[in-house]
């Protein structure tokens, strides 16, 4: 799923009616606060998915060779969080695994540990020999398998609640 491009995420982008809801929020006098509330509620709807992805990466086997290096699995888990954007280039909600900057010079760790082909790196202490290492294949994707509809419905419910809140003001 995340093999192709930069955003390493699973999301409910292009929910029908989200753009219309965002336009209605802008038209309201306190639209900024309403947008914040909508974004917060949509993030809350996706938190169980983010937690499932964090649990999945923490279950990846570890050799524990480099005890002094930053822990890779927990560093990746800290970078998994729900993200909501309303308006702009895209509107939607998604769970995203952000890059792990400054962790073993391995910023693409979430993406690389997820893919079947793994990643290559030099053997510790020997710059001439390289090895291919494999993580837990599709740990991110499998965390959401079969649950996409649940998260989509929860995000749509947050939108519906906000639409009702706006409609109740009108009369």
Image (spheres, grey):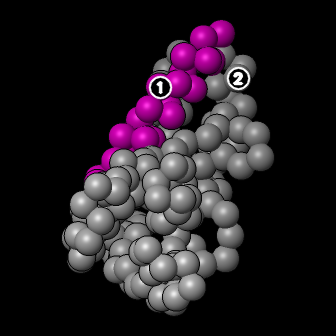
**Can the viewer see residue 47?**
yes
Q: Which mark is residue 37?
A: 1
How many residues crowd mark 1 within 10 Å: few (<14), some (14–19), many (20+)? some
Q: Residue at x 29, y 55 (%)?
A: 68
| Relative depth, front residue between 132 and 45 | 132
Whole-percent x and y of residue 48? 29, 53
Above or below for 59 versus 45: below
Predominant SS of the magenta segment:
helix
Quadrant for residue 21, please give it: top right
- Residue 121 coordinates in the image, percent (x, y): 52, 78
The Cα atoms of the two marked residues, 2 and 1, are separated by 13 Å
Position of 128 with respect to 156 (left or right) is right
Q: Give the crowd class for mark 2: few <14, some 14-19, many >=20 residues within 10 Å.
A: some
Q: Residue at x 36, y 75 (%)?
A: 139
Name which quarter of the figure residue 108 lies in: bottom right
Q: Is residue 37 magenta?
A: yes
Which residue is labeled 2 in the image? 26
Magenta stretch in the rendered image: 29-52
- The local secondary structure at tag 2 comes to helix
């Amino acid at each position: 799923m995340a093999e192709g491009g930069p955003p390493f995420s699973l999301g409910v982008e292009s929910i029908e009616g989200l753009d219309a809801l965002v336009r209605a929020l802008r038209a309201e006098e306190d639209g900024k606060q309403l947008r914040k509330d909508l974004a917060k509620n949509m993030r809350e709807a996706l938190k169980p998915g983010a937690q499932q992805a964090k649990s999945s990466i923490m279950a990846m086997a570890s050799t524990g060779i480099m005890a002094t290096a930053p822990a890779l699995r927990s560093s990746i888990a800290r970078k998994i969080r729900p993200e909501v954007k309303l308006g702009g280039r895209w509107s939607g909600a998604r769970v995203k695994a952000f890059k792990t900057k400054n962790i073993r010079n391995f910023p693409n760790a979430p993406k690389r540990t997820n893919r079947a082909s793994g990643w290559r790196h030099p053997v510790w202490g020997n710059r001439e020999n390289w090895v291919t290492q494999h993580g837990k294949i599709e740990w991110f994707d499998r965390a959401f398998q079969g649950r996409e509809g649940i998260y989509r419905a929860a995000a749509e419910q947050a939108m519906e609640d906000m639409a009702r809140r706006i409609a109740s003001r009108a009369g």
